[in-house]
Amino acid sequence: MDDLKPTPASRRVVAGAHGSDALRVGDLTERKKHRKDPYGAFLPNRVVSHNTMRLIVGVELTVALLIWLNSPFKVLPRPMEVLEALGKLWRTQGLATDLMTSFQLNLEALGWSAAISLALAYLTVIPVFRPIVVALSKGRFLSMIGFTTVFMVMGLGGHHLKVAMLVYGITVFFVTSMASVIAAVPKSEFDHARTLRMSEWRVVWEVVVLGTADKALEVLRQNAAMGWMMLTMVEGIVKSEGGVGTMLIAQDKYFHLSEVFAIQIVILLVGLFQDSMIGLVRRFACPYADMVLERK
């Protein structure tokens, strides 16, 4: 039993090992502090603090505002003119009502697009469905001209026609991105699930559906803006329900640039709000997603 007692030499070796580990941990901590150095904002692969990033954003917004105020293009409206136009549109021309109409339309189209795209992307695990998904993904090169007539022949009109056009425009991009995400799942993850004696359908659920949930939400976030970009065209074709797209076309027709800028800023703010909400859902539903990222 005495032979099993640690000798002074072994204690020195262990202490040296622990000392080297502590040194390495200290080096990593020091390196992390160095990477968060506020003066490293102009160097590659630096992680700056939140306060430093807020300062950077504030300075850049101030510079952008100064450039806008001193723009040599006199035809462009100034910030105060845009604010006055925004107040007039909000108080007297029903901007709030039109914004709610467009927001509900965009959410409905986004919901349908997400359901259709995810279902088609998950079906790519079955070989017979892969050519169908590939063919649908090529639709992102097609113009919307002509599809309006097709949807109308199918009996769609008014609100349903707008939803169908938005769903088509979002889905062809959504399904392309999501199919690429699923195709990029490593073979090792499938093999690991099979070693746990899962059935193939259980493997699909665990690896393909649950394993890519964080990426699915990120793809949803990236493609959600597509509806706002298409909104003006869709609401310009079907004007029965109004919306910010219809209002934007009307103001642009008469060259009311202050009102056009005001509506565009409102659309931007609502789009940013929607984007942040999807990002918040992703952080709560998949908190593990960003743990290994360099900038987190």
Image: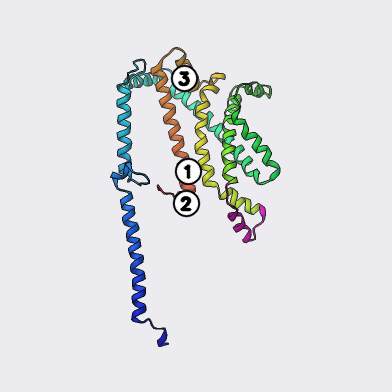
The residue lying at 48 percent from left, 40 percent from top is 278
Instruction: Report the span colored magenta.
Output: 184-200
Q: Is residue 198 magenta?
A: yes
The residue lying at 32 percent from left, 39 percent from top is 54
Most extreme residue toward the left is 39
Locate residue 254 relative to residue 115 in the image: left or right.
left
Q: Given contact means CB atoms under 8 Å apart, are the residues at marks 1 and 3 in contact? A: no
Disc 1 crowd rating (10 Å Cα; few below 14, some 14-19, many 20+) is few
The residue wearing badge 2 is 288
Q: Position of residue 138 (x, y in %)?
A: 62, 33
Q: Position of residue 257 (x, y in %)?
A: 40, 17
The quadrant where residue 30 appears: bottom left
The label number, if any, that marks residue 281 in the structure image = 1
Q: Which residue is at the front of the view, 213 or 48?
A: 48
Q: Earlier in the sequence, mark 1 or mark 3?
A: 3
Q: Which residue is at the front of the view, 289 or 32?
A: 32
